[in-house]
Amino acid sequence: HGEPVNIYTKEQLASMTEEEVYNIITRDLYENAYETQKANPQKYTGKNLAEGLENLLFICPKCKSHDKLTTHGNTVACTECGFEFNYNEYGMLENSPYNTVYDFANWQKTEIEHDVKNNVSYSADNVIFSSIDKHIKTVLTTDTATMSNDSITCGEYNINMSDITDMAIYGKHGIVFSANGTYYEMFVPHGINAIKFLLYFDVYEKLK
Protein backbone atom coordinates (compact mmCIF):
# COMPACT_ATOMS: atom_id res chain seq x y z
CA HIS A 1 0.00 0.00 0.00
CA GLY A 2 1.04 3.61 -0.37
CA GLU A 3 -0.05 7.03 0.77
CA PRO A 4 1.02 10.68 0.37
CA VAL A 5 3.70 11.72 2.84
CA ASN A 6 4.01 15.43 2.15
CA ILE A 7 2.77 17.91 -0.43
CA TYR A 8 4.89 20.89 -1.47
CA THR A 9 3.76 23.93 -3.41
CA LYS A 10 5.72 25.19 -6.39
CA GLU A 11 6.58 28.29 -4.36
CA GLN A 12 8.08 26.18 -1.59
CA LEU A 13 10.15 24.17 -4.04
CA ALA A 14 11.28 27.30 -5.87
CA SER A 15 12.64 28.70 -2.62
CA MET A 16 14.74 25.60 -1.89
CA THR A 17 18.24 24.74 -3.03
CA GLU A 18 18.85 21.50 -4.90
CA GLU A 19 20.36 20.03 -1.75
CA GLU A 20 17.29 20.97 0.31
CA VAL A 21 14.99 19.37 -2.25
CA TYR A 22 17.14 16.23 -2.26
CA ASN A 23 17.07 16.10 1.55
CA ILE A 24 13.26 16.30 1.78
CA ILE A 25 12.88 13.63 -0.90
CA THR A 26 15.28 11.39 1.01
CA ARG A 27 13.46 12.04 4.29
CA ASP A 28 9.95 11.58 2.89
CA LEU A 29 10.71 8.38 0.99
CA TYR A 30 12.70 6.69 3.78
CA GLU A 31 11.17 3.44 4.93
CA ASN A 32 12.48 0.86 7.37
CA ALA A 33 10.45 -2.15 6.26
CA TYR A 34 11.46 -4.13 9.34
CA GLU A 35 10.12 -1.50 11.74
CA THR A 36 6.86 -1.43 9.77
CA GLN A 37 6.69 -5.22 9.89
CA LYS A 38 7.30 -5.29 13.64
CA ALA A 39 4.49 -2.75 14.19
CA ASN A 40 2.01 -4.59 11.95
CA PRO A 41 3.27 -8.11 11.08
CA GLN A 42 2.24 -9.48 7.70
CA LYS A 43 2.97 -12.96 6.36
CA TYR A 44 5.10 -13.39 3.26
CA THR A 45 4.44 -17.02 2.50
CA GLY A 46 6.49 -19.04 0.08
CA LYS A 47 9.06 -21.75 -0.34
CA ASN A 48 12.81 -21.49 0.24
CA LEU A 49 12.53 -18.17 2.04
CA ALA A 50 16.19 -18.07 3.14
CA GLU A 51 17.76 -19.04 -0.17
CA GLY A 52 20.00 -16.33 -1.54
CA LEU A 53 20.77 -14.66 1.80
CA GLU A 54 24.41 -15.75 1.42
CA ASN A 55 24.68 -13.13 -1.32
CA LEU A 56 24.41 -10.45 1.40
CA LEU A 57 25.40 -12.21 4.63
CA PHE A 58 28.89 -13.70 4.59
CA ILE A 59 30.16 -13.59 8.20
CA CYS A 60 28.98 -16.30 10.60
CA PRO A 61 27.68 -14.57 13.76
CA LYS A 62 29.00 -17.41 15.92
CA CYS A 63 32.48 -18.33 14.65
CA LYS A 64 32.97 -15.24 12.37
CA SER A 65 34.16 -17.38 9.46
CA HIS A 66 33.81 -15.79 6.03
CA ASP A 67 31.96 -17.33 3.06
CA LYS A 68 30.83 -20.35 5.05
CA LEU A 69 27.10 -19.51 5.20
CA THR A 70 24.89 -21.63 2.98
CA THR A 71 21.13 -21.60 2.54
CA HIS A 72 18.54 -24.30 1.99
CA GLY A 73 14.80 -23.87 2.29
CA ASN A 74 14.22 -21.47 5.20
CA THR A 75 17.55 -22.24 6.89
CA VAL A 76 20.94 -20.54 6.91
CA ALA A 77 23.80 -22.74 8.11
CA CYS A 78 27.54 -22.28 8.67
CA THR A 79 29.58 -25.12 7.20
CA GLU A 80 32.49 -24.18 9.47
CA CYS A 81 30.89 -24.43 12.94
CA GLY A 82 27.42 -25.88 12.22
CA PHE A 83 25.50 -22.88 13.55
CA GLU A 84 22.01 -22.56 12.02
CA PHE A 85 19.24 -19.99 12.03
CA ASN A 86 15.96 -19.61 10.16
CA TYR A 87 14.22 -16.94 8.08
CA ASN A 88 10.50 -17.11 8.87
CA GLU A 89 7.40 -16.11 6.94
CA TYR A 90 7.32 -12.73 8.71
CA GLY A 91 10.77 -11.84 7.36
CA MET A 92 12.37 -12.26 10.78
CA LEU A 93 15.37 -14.34 11.79
CA GLU A 94 14.91 -17.10 14.36
CA ASN A 95 17.68 -18.59 16.55
CA SER A 96 19.96 -15.76 15.44
CA PRO A 97 21.59 -13.09 17.63
CA TYR A 98 20.01 -10.57 15.23
CA ASN A 99 16.26 -10.42 14.69
CA THR A 100 16.35 -9.05 11.16
CA VAL A 101 18.57 -9.12 8.09
CA TYR A 102 18.88 -5.34 8.55
CA ASP A 103 20.34 -5.78 12.05
CA PHE A 104 22.57 -8.63 10.87
CA ALA A 105 23.90 -6.51 8.00
CA ASN A 106 24.61 -3.59 10.36
CA TRP A 107 26.60 -5.90 12.66
CA GLN A 108 28.44 -7.21 9.61
CA LYS A 109 29.41 -3.63 8.70
CA THR A 110 30.99 -3.15 12.13
CA GLU A 111 33.05 -6.30 11.53
CA ILE A 112 34.13 -5.01 8.11
CA GLU A 113 35.11 -1.67 9.63
CA HIS A 114 37.28 -3.48 12.17
CA ASP A 115 38.90 -5.48 9.37
CA VAL A 116 39.62 -2.41 7.24
CA LYS A 117 41.17 -0.56 10.18
CA ASN A 118 43.40 -3.57 10.87
CA ASN A 119 44.17 -4.20 7.17
CA VAL A 120 42.58 -7.66 7.20
CA SER A 121 42.34 -8.72 3.57
CA TYR A 122 39.28 -10.20 1.84
CA SER A 123 39.74 -12.71 -0.95
CA ALA A 124 38.00 -15.03 -3.38
CA ASP A 125 39.40 -17.86 -5.51
CA ASN A 126 38.89 -18.39 -9.24
CA VAL A 127 37.92 -14.79 -9.90
CA ILE A 128 37.72 -13.81 -13.58
CA PHE A 129 39.54 -10.47 -13.76
CA SER A 130 38.90 -8.38 -16.89
CA SER A 131 39.37 -4.93 -18.35
CA ILE A 132 36.64 -3.22 -20.33
CA ASP A 133 37.31 -0.72 -23.10
CA LYS A 134 34.57 0.70 -25.32
CA HIS A 135 32.22 -2.09 -24.20
CA ILE A 136 34.76 -4.75 -25.18
CA LYS A 137 35.77 -7.07 -22.34
CA THR A 138 39.23 -8.59 -22.23
CA VAL A 139 39.93 -11.33 -19.69
CA LEU A 140 43.26 -10.56 -18.06
CA THR A 141 43.52 -13.53 -15.72
CA THR A 142 41.59 -16.04 -13.61
CA ASP A 143 43.12 -16.23 -10.17
CA THR A 144 42.68 -15.45 -6.48
CA ALA A 145 41.57 -11.84 -5.97
CA THR A 146 42.56 -10.13 -2.74
CA MET A 147 41.48 -6.75 -1.41
CA SER A 148 43.24 -4.95 1.44
CA ASN A 149 43.32 -1.29 2.38
CA ASP A 150 46.45 -1.06 0.23
CA SER A 151 45.43 -2.65 -3.05
CA ILE A 152 43.43 -5.11 -5.10
CA THR A 153 45.53 -7.93 -6.52
CA CYS A 154 44.61 -10.72 -8.89
CA GLY A 155 47.43 -12.80 -10.29
CA GLU A 156 50.11 -10.45 -11.62
CA TYR A 157 47.77 -7.45 -11.55
CA ASN A 158 47.99 -5.00 -8.65
CA ILE A 159 45.86 -1.85 -8.34
CA ASN A 160 46.29 0.62 -5.50
CA MET A 161 43.13 1.29 -3.53
CA SER A 162 43.94 5.00 -3.61
CA ASP A 163 43.67 4.91 -7.41
CA ILE A 164 40.14 3.48 -7.44
CA THR A 165 37.58 6.20 -8.07
CA ASP A 166 34.34 4.21 -8.13
CA MET A 167 33.06 0.71 -7.44
CA ALA A 168 29.70 -1.00 -7.93
CA ILE A 169 28.13 -4.45 -8.00
CA TYR A 170 25.94 -5.85 -10.76
CA GLY A 171 23.93 -9.03 -10.50
CA LYS A 172 25.08 -11.24 -7.65
CA HIS A 173 28.68 -11.87 -8.60
CA GLY A 174 30.07 -8.97 -10.64
CA ILE A 175 32.20 -6.17 -9.16
CA VAL A 176 33.19 -3.30 -11.45
CA PHE A 177 35.48 -0.37 -10.70
CA SER A 178 37.54 2.37 -12.34
CA ALA A 179 41.22 3.07 -11.73
CA ASN A 180 43.68 5.24 -13.62
CA GLY A 181 41.28 5.67 -16.52
CA THR A 182 40.67 1.94 -16.96
CA TYR A 183 37.45 0.06 -16.22
CA TYR A 184 37.82 -3.34 -14.54
CA GLU A 185 35.54 -6.23 -13.69
CA MET A 186 35.94 -8.97 -11.08
CA PHE A 187 33.51 -11.84 -11.57
CA VAL A 188 33.31 -13.92 -8.40
CA PRO A 189 32.24 -17.58 -8.76
CA HIS A 190 28.95 -18.89 -7.40
CA GLY A 191 29.12 -19.78 -3.72
CA ILE A 192 31.45 -16.91 -2.84
CA ASN A 193 30.04 -13.61 -1.65
CA ALA A 194 30.87 -10.71 -3.99
CA ILE A 195 29.30 -7.80 -2.14
CA LYS A 196 31.93 -8.07 0.61
CA PHE A 197 34.40 -6.35 -1.74
CA LEU A 198 32.02 -3.44 -2.30
CA LEU A 199 31.29 -3.14 1.43
CA TYR A 200 35.01 -3.23 2.19
CA PHE A 201 35.67 -0.48 -0.37
CA ASP A 202 32.81 1.66 1.00
CA VAL A 203 34.27 1.46 4.52
CA TYR A 204 37.76 2.17 3.17
CA GLU A 205 36.45 5.31 1.44
CA LYS A 206 34.68 6.45 4.60
CA LEU A 207 37.75 5.97 6.79
CA LYS A 208 40.51 7.31 4.54
Image: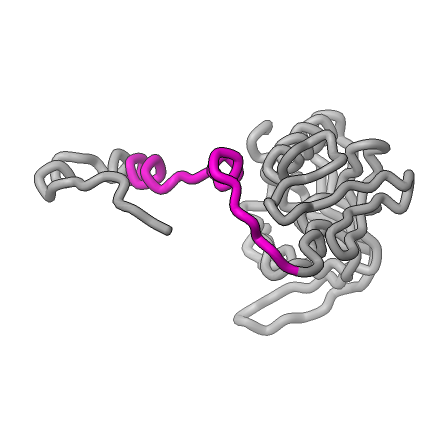
Q: Measured from the top left, where is residue 92 in percent x and y?
A: 63, 40
The part of the image, by quadrant, that contains residue 144 is bottom right
Quadrant assignment for the C terminus: top right
The part of the image, by quadrant, that contains residue 147 is top right
Residue at 69%, 48% in the rendered image? 159
The part of the image, by quadrant, that contains residue 10 is top left
Q: Is residue 134 visible?
A: yes
- Establish if 158 lies above or below 60: below
Residue at 59%, 51% in the rendered image? 179
Q: Measured from the top left, where is residue 11 in percent x and y?
A: 8, 39
Residue at 91%, 38% in the rendered image? 81
Which is nearer the eye, 179 or 107? 107
User: From the viewer's perspective, is 189 left or right of 100?
Assistant: right
Which is nearer the eye, 110 or 50? 50
Q: Measured from the top left, where is residue 65 in percent x and y?
A: 84, 38
Please check the rendered image and state whether residue 30 is part of the magenta-colored stretch, yes or no. Answer: yes
Residues in magenta, as a range: 22-46
User: From the viewer's perspective, is 181 left or right of 125?
Assistant: left
Q: Most prominent secondary structure in the magenta stretch? A: helix
Q: How many marks?
A: 0
Q: Measured from the top left, where is residue 50 in percent x and y?
A: 70, 52
Q: Is residue 156 visible?
A: no
Residue farthest to the bottom, as pictured = 136
